[in-house]
Amino acid sequence: MKPTIELDRQKGVLSIQIPGDLTSTSVREFQKEILASVLMPAGVAPPWQVVAFDLSAAQMVDSMGLNLIVKIFKIVRAAGGRMQVVYHDTNVHRTLLFTRLDHHVELVKG
C-alpha cells in the first residue's frame, strides 16, 4: 500500500496519509516518495505552510517510523513550516508523547 499525498494550495497544506502502521516494513516501501514530497530545491519556497502527517489508520509506530517523522519535521522546520501529526490509536499517541514529539509537532486526534 502507498501513502496518499495531496497538496491543497489554497490552504497551504500538504497532507500525507499513511495507510496503516508506520513500521520498518512500510517505511522502506515509501520513504523516498514522502521525502520527495516535502523536499524543496535550495532557495525555493515550499507550496505549503503546514504538513499534516496522518497516522489515523496506524495502530503502531516503531523506531523507523519515528525516524521518518523526525526527518520530515526537520525538513518542514527548515522551510519555515509547521507539522501536524494526526493520530487515532492511543498506543500511537503514547509513543508520540513518550518520545516528546509533542514538544515539536502539533498532535491532532483524528
Image (tube, grey):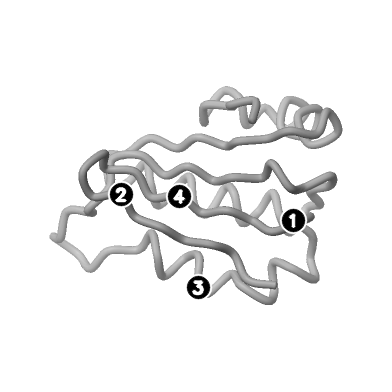
As measured in the structure, the alpha-carbon distance from the residue carrying label 3 to the one carrying label 2 is: 18 Å
For marks 4 and 1, the one nearer the N-term is 4
Residue located beneath label 1 in the image: 22
* Residues at marks 3 and 1 touching, judged by CB atoms closer than 8 Å: no
- Label count reads 4
Q: Residue at x 56, y 23 (%)?
A: 103
The residue carrying pointer 1 sits among few (fewer than 14), some (14 to 19) or many (20 or more) residues within 10 Å by Cα, namely many
As measured in the structure, the alpha-carbon distance from the residue carrying label 3 to the one carrying label 4 is: 13 Å
Q: Secondary structure at mark 3?
A: helix
Q: Position of residue 87 (x, y in %)?
A: 68, 35
Residue located beneath label 4 in the image: 15
Q: Quadrant of residue 21?
A: bottom right
Tag shown at residue 33 = 3
For marks 1 and 2, the one nearer the N-term is 2
Badge nearest the viewer, 1 or 2: 2
Which residue is most to the left?
43
Q: Residue at x 27, y 64 (%)?
A: 40
Residue located beneath label 2 in the image: 8
As measured in the structure, the alpha-carbon distance from the residue carrying label 1 to the one carrying label 2 is: 24 Å
For marks 2 and 4, the one nearer the N-term is 2
Q: Secondary structure at mark 4?
A: strand
**Eyeballing the image, is 7 above or below 90?**
below
Q: Residue at x 62, y 31 (%)?
A: 101
